[in-house]
Image: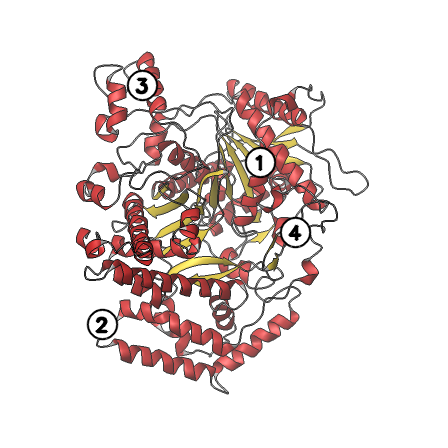
Amino acid sequence: MFALHPPRAGQPKTFALQRTLPRLPVPPLEDSVGAYLKSLRPVLEQMYDAGALPHEIEKRELYAHDFVRPGGLGRVLQERLRDLDHVSPHNWLDDTLWLALAYHTWRAPLLVNSNWWLLFKPDPANPPAPVAVRSAPALGAGLAAAVDGIKGGVGLASDADHAQAQAHAAAEAMPYPDPNPTASTPPGSMGGGAAWLADNADSAKLAPVTPADYEAVTTRAEITPWQVRRAAWITRRLAEFRTRILREEIAPDTSRAGPFDMSQYQKIFNLSRIPRPKSDTFSRIDNAATHVSVLIDDMVYSVDVFAPPVDGDAPEPLSVPDVEGALSAAVADAKARKEAGEKAPLIGVLTADERDTWTRNREALLNLSPVNRATLESISSSLVCLSLDPYTIPSLPSADPLVLAPVDAQIRNAASGLWGGRNRWFDKAISVVVETNGRAGVMGEHSPVDALIPSIVVDYVLGEPVDAAAFDQAPAADAKWRKLEWVTDDSVEHEITACQARNAALIADSDPSQLWFSEYGADWIKKSAKLPPDAYIQQALQLAWYVDQGYATATYESASTRLMLHGRTDVIRSLSGESRAFVKGMLDPAASDASRHVLLSTAVGAHNALTRAASTGKGYDRHLMGLKVHLRAGEAHALFDDDAYAKSQEWKLSTSGLSAGGSFMGTGFGAAWPDGYGINYLAGPHLVKFGIESKTSCAATSTARFKHNLVQALRDMRRVCEAAAAQTLGQGAAAGGGDNVQARL
């Protein structure tokens, strides 16, 4: 990643190229409306039968013509948007519209709905994660046999020795997978796919692991020395990064297309989202702050990780022994308080609530005592939140061959934690979560930055594993830390209890899991299939969705607009006429693999064109949004009132690619619609990791089932590409077009 490159002589300062970046344009009205019209056809195909379709298409063409005609309402709205651009310091979207429309006016809880998560690879010194062994039907055959050999039968442990033996056998059978392998696995080696689904469609093997399952086997214990050490290392590396940003020692991110906007790096640290009635806001960024907020079994501490600033310079990070010493002192204090019977009020769970409810409860806290304001402002201004959890969630083995039990346990803790979101602060831009065995991840509040930027920072953090020699020096005797206090009353405690129950229900409804597709990765797609990986993966998602659901849906893929000043994102509408033709071809038993390959190549080319347009300020979704919000009282237009306009933004398949992800075990975010999927993916050279989330309350979706359908889609697409390559080489096409998807539906 960009920030991993060592400084080079003469490199520009971090923000030196900002003045060279172009502004986000207001695209030509005709271009945006024309592109939108083209994107509507596959949506209209799902809304109307073949006989009505031509008339419905013509109707939308008339709406568009009236909108863009001279004197039409579209022209008026375009001029209003140009005026907004004229008065915007950086760009018309980010300066005034984006935060409110996309995030801050949305009143749903941040938990699952908005916050994203990122899983760190293990440090080489991490001890193995615990494993809880369940009954035989839930175990894979190899694992069940291993446990059977310990004690005549499989089940929950009857005594501590048996439990330890079971966990040891299970751990031997399921080591942590390598997030950055040097080669892919053989085709078909993962198991699963369509054949497995056919045999297990109604099986309990597809049932998700619930938070209650994890809570039943998770033992709350003491914070461990290794946990503190790894947390100190991670925190020190984050502090280093902030200092390098403030001193402009990080080179600007660049690509062949040009330099990228760097403004989001200024919004990672030392701020929080603050709930306000109807629309949230941010706390003031405090780059002089020297502390992190540490949550230890729900007690909150302020721990200094920087020396005081000198002469206005960026504060210098403390040494890792000093950070470890301060964290250890806070941990010891929390332990002593707990042993003395002190119970921390679970204020953090309130941050996961519906935003207006949290607004009221926060105001109640502020009115109770100035102590609460001091604590809230300390949390808001801190570098990051650091959650030291008094447990490591055990892996729960599964007979589903696509389940990575240690990774899925890690997801659950990074995404939400257990027991209704305890020991978390969901408003914080960055929250680092560390379990007792050192397993770690990060949860991020989405509004200040897009997840790519924190992922670059985390790549820097994980670029060096914990160096034991760095801790040889004795810590300073005057480590600065203090416990932050709360003043509550019966009303606040009642709200906490009620909110914790709501949080628990929200967490229970979320079914996140990782799919590690290891049979090929970006290298094979580029070198053998000779196609761009992201566009290829998007076609696989289209195919998997259709097989899974039986209809096509509007699909969101985020496109970075960082080539422009203060650029954030626009939309790539992955559901296109070309992608629909490709999916239809894959499902047509009469189609040949040669024809399917042509359709795939065409769909990939169309997707690439959409990506280029959206990334260079020529996208139309943000433009149309900007036009619509400029409607005034009494103004309306059929283009926006049309059911198809709303339907085309029902992002039941919400997707985003991040990076190669060699340092990450996975990533993810919640589905945007209750009957959809949220999918974030990391396309590495030999391994593609998909973070997939859906809702357990929706009978139509299943994270586990979608994983198998996606694996099959990727295998079928490989077959199509290899058949085309063989034909090109004169080796003959696969007889009869090969196995086809339709035969398995």
Residue at the spot x=33%, y=39% of the render? 186
Q: Amino acid at mark 2?
A: Asp
Residue at the spot x=54%, y=61% of the render? 98
Q: Earlier in the sequence, mark 1 or mark 3?
A: 3
Secondary structure type for disc 3: helix
Structural crowding at the residue carrying mark 4, measured as other residues with C-alpha within 10 Å and reported as few (<14), some (14–19) or many (≥20): many
Q: Amino acid at mark 4?
A: Pro
- Asked whether disc 2 touches disc 4, contact meaning CB atoms under 8 Å apart, the reply is no
Residue 233 higher or lower than 258, as above or below:
above
Q: Which residue is mark 1?
A: 463
Disc marking residue 252: 4
Of the two numbered discs 2 and 4 in the rendering, the one whose residue sits closer to the viewer: 4
Left or right for 20, reference 201: right
Q: Earlier in the sequence, mark 2 or mark 4?
A: 2
Left or right for 478, reference 614: right
Q: Marks 1 and 2, Cα distance to the nearest angstrom?
A: 54 Å
Of the two numbered discs 4 and 3 in the rendering, the one whose residue sits closer to the viewer: 4
Q: Earlier in the sequence, mark 4 or mark 3?
A: 3
- Asked whether disc 1 touches disc 3, contact meaning CB atoms under 8 Å apart, the reply is no
Q: Which residue is mark 2?
A: 49
Across and down, in percent, residue 620 comes to 48, 69
